[in-house]
Amino acid sequence: MEKIRAIIIGVVIWFFGVSAFTLSFFIPILHDAELQANLVLFLTVIPLVWFGTKIYFLKGAKTKGFWVGLTFFFIAALLDALITVPLLIIPNGGSHLEFYADPGFWCIGLLFIGVATLFGHLKKKRTTEFI
């Protein structure tokens, strides 16, 4: 696994995900702003992880998509612990425990892993069809 590339892509995915989550609070569409932000994040993560996984595999990496998705999710979870929770969650009355105990967090994590795994599976299928 090209660890540095995976880490950099994971940081970029996290940055755009947190940006979309935060910006969604400034465009009130639903009455529940937190639900809206989570929905925006959920819908944003799909193309971000898909594109990030595509970039990761551009140089012919042989890693399984599952491990790429797990790495992206680990990076996001780490940056959430170091940056997102202290700067965005705690000032609004939340905590690390509440953040990581939220089922939505784990659904997003499964989405990270699932999208990257699907991309890796489809990429492998495409390359083996032509051999």
Image (cartoon, rainbow, N blue to C red):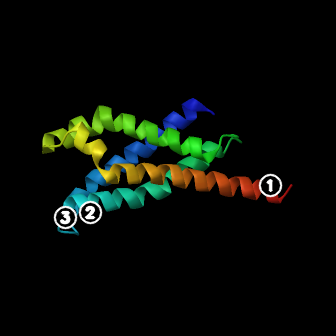
- Dot 3, how many residues are within 10 Å of its Cα: few (below 14), some (14-19), or many (20+)? few
Q: Position of residue 50 (x, y in %)?
A: 54, 54
Q: Earlier in the sequence, mark 3 or mark 1?
A: 3
Hey, which quadrant is residue 41 in on the image?
bottom left
**Three-letter code, disc 2:** Gln
Report the amino acid beneath label 1: Thr
Distance between mark 3 and mark 2 Cα atoms = 6 Å
Can residue 71 be seen here? The reply is yes
- Report how far apart the C-alphas of labels 1 and 2 lie in the structure: 41 Å
Q: Secondary structure at mark 1?
A: helix
Q: Tell me the crowding category of disc 2: few under 14, some 14 to 19, or many 20 or more residues within 10 angstroms, Cα based.
A: some
Query: Mark 1 or mark 2: which comes first in sequence?
Result: 2
Residue at the image point whose x is 27% and y is 54% from the top: 23
Determine which of the numbered discs, if any, sits on residue 32 in the image.
Answer: 3
Residue 126, quarter of picture: bottom right
The span from disc 3 to disc 1 (Cα, nearest Å) is 47 Å
Mark 3 belongs to which amino acid?
Asp
In the image, is 130 to the left or to the right of 121? Answer: right
Q: Secondary structure at mark 2?
A: helix
Tags 3 and 2 in contact by the CB under 8 Å rule? yes
Q: Is residue 25 above or below residue 60?
A: below
Reading the image, the residue beneath label 1 is 128
61 over 105 or under it: above or below: above
Label annotation for residue 101: none
Percent position of residue 123, x then y = 69, 54
Residue at the spot 60% in from the left edge and 43% down from the top edge? 56
Q: Quadrant of residue 96?
A: top left
Looking at the rendered structure, the number of numbered marks drawn on it comes to 3
Can the viewer see residue 50 in this picture? no
Please give the residue where the numbered disc 2 appears in the rendered image.
Answer: 36
